[in-house]
Amino acid sequence: AQSVTQLGSHVSVSEGALVLLRCNYSSSVPPYLFWYVQYPNQGLQLLLKYTTGATLVKGINGFEAEFKKSETSFHLTKPSAHMSDAAEYFCAVITNTGNQFYFGTGTSLTVIP
Amino acid sequence: DTGVSQNPRHKITKRGQNVTFRCDPISEHNRLYWYRQTLGQGPEFLTYFQNEAQLEKSRLLSDRFSAERPKGSFSTLEIQRTEQGDSAMYLCASSLDSNSPLHFGNGTRLTVT
């Protein structure tokens, strides 16, 4: 069975500081992994995805994530936080049947001016 | 591509009433998903359609919930005899194929009083 665990339900960083949001997955087969961002009262927007190939994936808004099979991790990073990055971030894994996305419980990012 | 559209954006209803939500997916997407999201949680899978066929339903989906996608285009989610515990954001998403990312609508927020 597939699942994801997001460590830290709330993360606060100063504007301009490194953003690191953690995600660990559990999967019996090679997973497809995704990061989504959600702003208040809106749906989820895709930030980036890992399917196959290069393990370092670049997404929108300067975010990137690295797939580390040995650590079963897919942490999301951004070198320099911007005020507009404040939102809820969700890590997701897709099942090997491709029918269900499993989402983590989310990490709320606060950016301090 | 106008994105995934959901109506209404907000619905307030009294306990015991029936409600129906509509989702219009991206036109070329044959996969359509319904998720439910409560405060502080990630989206929880409810059901999934490929074209007009409902291929998977979550055990979370009680008999009071029914979803349809009659012509393989838009979908409706009906909740009968609503309960206060049904209060949540109901998210619709669509995708092109089994390993493609989900594209989400902005959701319908249901409040049952």
Image: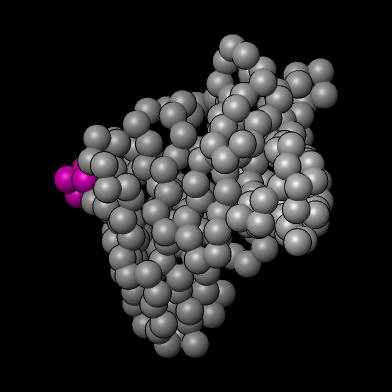
The residue nearer to you, when weighing A18 against A48, is A18
Residue B106 visible to an observer of this rendering: yes
Name above or below for residue B78 compared with residue B74: below
Residue A5 visible to an observer of this rendering: no
At 41% from the left edge and 43% from the top edge, which residue is drawn? B103
The residue nearer to you, when weighing A2 against A40, is A40
Tell me, yes or no, whether the highlighted magenta stretch contains residue A7.
no
At 42% from the left edge and 49% from the top edge, which residue is drawn? B104
* Residue A66 at x, y percent in the picture: 71, 25
* Residue B101 at x, y percent in the picture: 46, 34
Name above or below for residue A65 compared with residue A9: above
Please identify the dominant SS of the magenta region.
loop
**Image side of residue B78 versus residue A45, left or right:** left
Q: Which residues are magenta?
A: B68-73
**Image side of residue A37 versus residue A15, left or right:** left
* Residue A57 at x, y percent in the picture: 62, 24
**Image side of residue B24 versus residue A29, left or right:** left
At 31% from the left edge and 65% from the top edge, which residue is drawn? B7
Q: Say which quadrant the N terminus of chain B sits in.
A: top left
Q: Residue A69 lies in what quarter of the image? A: top right
**Image side of residue A85 versus residue A45, left or right:** right
Residue lying farthest to the left in this orientation: B71
At 32% from the left edge and 47% from the top edge, which residue is drawn? B3
